Amino acid sequence: MTRTHRHDLSLGIQCFFTGLIAVGAAFASYRHGLHFALRFGADEATAWIWPLIIDGLLTIATVELWKAAGSKWQA
């Protein structure tokens, strides 16, 4: 097995397990947000979209911070 092939294989394995952990974390986060919304009085339709709204806002904020940090280093 060549060094490049080993590197590609290890990167593939790392990406697979990173994705697996991300899916598990997303599932746990969604369930937690759903139960939180239901517990504190949201109707069922709102409770189902609440976790998506919260995670979407966090994702938007994270991307904006990355963009700002990237432009700082390029200047």
Image (tube, grey):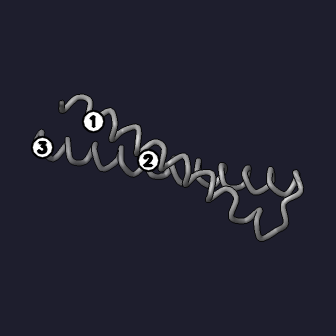
Residue 70 badge: 1
Residue 19 as seen in the image, left or right of residue 4: right
Q: Position of residue 45 (x, y in %)?
A: 77, 70
Question: Which residue is depicted at the point 68% across and 64% down?
Answer: 49
Q: Amino acid at mark 2?
A: Phe
Distance in Å between CA atoms under marks 3 and 2: 20 Å
Which comes before the other along the chain, label 3 or label 2?
3
Question: Which residue is depicted at the point 43% across and 46% down?
Answer: 18
Above or below: residue 20 compared with residue 4 = below
Q: Amino acid at mark 1?
A: Gly
Quarter holding the C terminus is top left
Q: Amino acid at mark 3?
A: Thr
The nearer-to-camera label among 1 and 3 is 1
Which comes before the other along the chain, label 1 or label 2?
2
Residue 17 badge: 2
Question: Which residue is depicted at the point 82% across and 68% down?
Answer: 44
Tell me the residue that label 3 is attached to: 4
